[in-house]
Amino acid sequence: MAQQIVAVRIRPLVEREIKVGAQDYWDSSSTAIFRKDVSDSLPFVFDHVIGKEEINRDVYNVFGKDIVTGAVKGINGTIFAYGQTSSGKTHTMLGSDTEPGLISYAMNDIFSLVQLVRLMSCHYAMPQLFYLYLEF
Ligand SMILES: Nc1ncnc2c1ncn2[C@@H]1O[C@H](COP(=O)(O)OP(=O)(O)OP(=O)(O)O)[C@@H](O)[C@H]1O
């Protein structure tokens, strides 16, 4: 059965946003974001809210890894980032020199898993893994 997870990621504010007081407008819980400056604000609810302290590796381990390992086993999966300009899509997916993004972690896992399956397919005591190898 298809499963979809929608998570909203909060990034740290940049200086120009702090200067205009952006920190006074939005707050969050583990599954919702809401306006702080509006007393009867309705929450915008998601499956998860990823806090600004979380790094790309955490995001990948929690939200990406299962999709990638599933894909290696033949289960279709998609990871994509959607949001307004400067919201952090490139930082999350591509990363930077100092912090790899989800694409790097995914590639790393894909190649490691494929290599592992190939190595294990030579092991005669594990015919079910040989079957997996034939699926590629
Ligand atoms: N989680 C984060 N932690 C620290 N800095 C971040 C984070 N997310 C984004 N940034 C910083 O915020 C800025 C904007 O992020 P980014 O370029 O990833 O946005 P974008 O959504 O790809 O924008 P665009 O749609 O214009 O390409 C960058 O300077 C980036 O380094």
Image (spheres, rainbow, N blue to C red):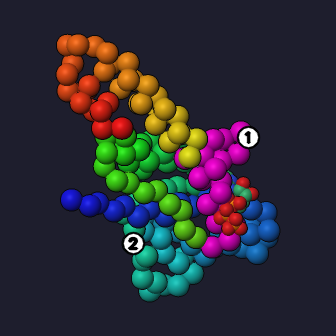
Q: Quadrant of residue 82?
A: bottom right
Residue 33: x, y in percent?
Answer: 47, 70
Q: Residue type at mark 2?
A: Val
User: Residue drawn 57% across and 81% down?
Assistant: 37
What span is in magenta?
84-102
Residue 56 appears in the rendering = no
Q: Give me the residue at 40% from left, 60% from top.
A: 48
Find disc 1 in the rendering and name its residue.
Answer: 97
Mark 1 sits near ligand 1, with its Cβ under 8 Å away = no
**Secondary structure mainly formed by the magenta segment:** loop
Q: Which residue is mark 2?
A: 45
Quarter location, residue 23? bottom right
Tell me if residue 83 comes above or below residue 57 in the rendering: below
Q: Nearer the viewer, mark 1 or mark 2?
A: 1
Q: Looking at the image, in which quadrant does ligand 1 appear?
A: bottom right
Residue 31 in the image: x percent, y percent? 39, 64
Q: Are marks 1 and 2 in contact (CB under 8 Å)?
A: no
Left or right relative to 21: residue 130: left
On residue 47, the disc is none
**Rendering quarter of residue 125:** top left
Q: Amino acid at mark 1?
A: Asp
